[in-house]
Amino acid sequence: MRSAYNLAKIGRGSMLCLTGEPGIGKTALVEDFLAELAAEGQCTIARGCCSRRLAGCESLPATA
């Protein structure tokens, strides 16, 4: 994650996929990494989530 973050800082984006058995600590790993970045104060962290309640719904158009 640190390597991908460093590449993103110089304009070379990437996508990481974190997989593993339930309960192995995937979320904790990401949360700890984001907390470290937040403590450094060198980036803005945005979060999103999916809602099962909205599954199958049309997406809303983007607004300017």
Image: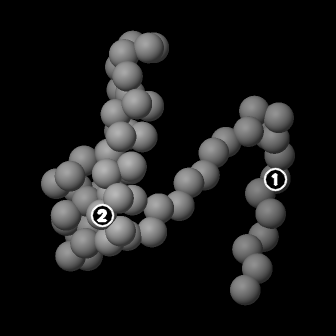
Residue drawn where x is 36% and y is 16% of the image: 24
Q: Residue furthest front?
A: 39
Helix, strand or loop at label 1? It is loop
On the image, the x and y values in percent for residue 6 come to 19, 64
Q: Which mark is residue 20?
A: none
Amino acid type of disc 1?
Glu
Hey, which quadrant is residue 7 in on the image?
bottom left
Q: Nearer the viewer, mark 2 or mark 1?
A: 2
Residue 7 placement, left or right of 57:
left
Hey, which quadrant is residue 44 in on the image?
bottom left
Residue 31 placement, left or right of 8:
right
Residue drawn where x is 35% and y is 68% of the image: 41
Query: Mark 2 = which residue?
Result: 40
Whether residue 17 is visible here, answered yes or no, is: yes
Helix, strand or loop at label 2? It is helix
Residue drawn where x is 39% and y is 59% of the image: 38
Q: Nearer the viewer, residue 6 or 53?
A: 6
Query: Mark 1 = which residue?
Result: 58
